[in-house]
Amino acid sequence: MSNSSSISHFLLLALADTWQLQLLHFCLLLGISLAALLGNGLIISAVACGHHLYTPMFFFLLNLALADLGSIFTTVPKAMHNSIWDTTNISYTGCAAQLFFFLFFISAEFFLLTVMCYDRYVSICKPLHYGTLLGRRACAHMAAAAWASGFLNSLLHTANTFSLPLCHGNTLGQFFCEVPQILKLSCSHSNLKEFVLIVLSICSAFGCFVFIVFSYVQIFRAVRRIPSEQGQLKAFSTCLPHLAVVSLFISTVMFSYLKPPSISSPSLDVAVSVLYSVVPPALNP
């Protein structure tokens, strides 16, 4: 039995058992990473260079693109390195850093998606008040609140997770460092602080989810009252891509963290984690 003070590295889950499959996974991850880099990079460049794009919608898209790039390049490069070099090692400090930045960017992304839902709600349901409700100062405050909330959530979870004594080995059942996998290694029978943090995070996420659902109910009711079919299509084309990414992100995160242990398996855990950590950053653009 070992404790956390003697653990110098963790062993991540290998994505495949054979070299051919490892090379295939490397190529798939490389393709997704390049797609995310190209799409989000074009958004950042367009918004930064195009003065006519200095609007609330594109301002939030810029922040979302930054969060997407941060989240995908926190986990994917290490997985690609492990696949091509046939290793599973990650250092103790590297695991802590990866967990912190992943939680930071993924939490900020979720809060930014919620703020973007509010932007769509105001633009469709209250268009005459759009300039008042979403002025530059209000947009800056909402974006800052999203990033600050992500930072605080990440800091609390990372600090608490790595303060627990670990005595059940150093093998993680995931291709990146994740809170539930590290908690499985803890020899502490009472993880009350982490339980409280998880409950608070779930409550916060549920509140954002309720707000998103309520906003889209109001949006669809307003769209149905638009007399022209062209106007309805324009409104739907603005909302449906955002709603699709939000639905994929929320459903996979909830399933990953709330699924019963009886249906848990390494392959299922990896597939679900890819759907919420890798796919949305590539699809958001």
Image (tube, grey):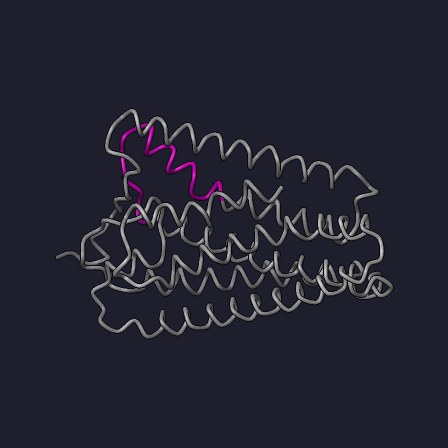
Marker count (numbered):
0
Q: In this view, does 220 lie to the left or right of 176?
A: right
In screen coordinates, is 150 left or right of 196? right
- Residue 181: name its quadrant: bottom left
Q: Is residue 209 left or right of residue 157?
A: right
Q: Which percent across, then down, holds residue 94?
A: 36, 46
Q: Which residue is drawn at 87% across and 64% down?
A: 128
Nearest the eye: 94 or 174: 174
At a point 63% along the width and 48% down the height, the residue shown is 241
Q: Is residue 285 magenta?
A: no
Which picture quadrant has residue 212? Answer: bottom right
Q: Which residue is drawn at 36% across and 27% down?
A: 24
Which span is picked out in magenta?
72-93
Q: Quadrant of the C terminus?
A: top right
The N terminus, quarter of image: bottom left
Q: Is residue 24 above or below residue 206?
A: above
Q: Nearer the viewer, residue 169 or 214?
A: 214
Q: Which of 172 and 20 is in front in this view?
A: 20
Question: Whole-percent x and y of residue 9?
Answer: 26, 46
Q: Is residue 276 left or right of residue 49?
A: left
Q: Residue 48, relative to residue 148: is it above or below?
A: above
Quadrant in the rendering for residue 281: top right
Pick the residue in front: 184 or 25: 25
Give the residue at the far right of this rendering: 128
Expressed as whole percent of the image width and height from the top left, the position of residue 108 reads: 56, 56
> Main SS type for the magenta part?
helix
For the point 31% across and 38% down, which residue is it?
15
**At which x and y percent is residue 130?**
82, 62
Is 82 covered by the magenta stretch? yes
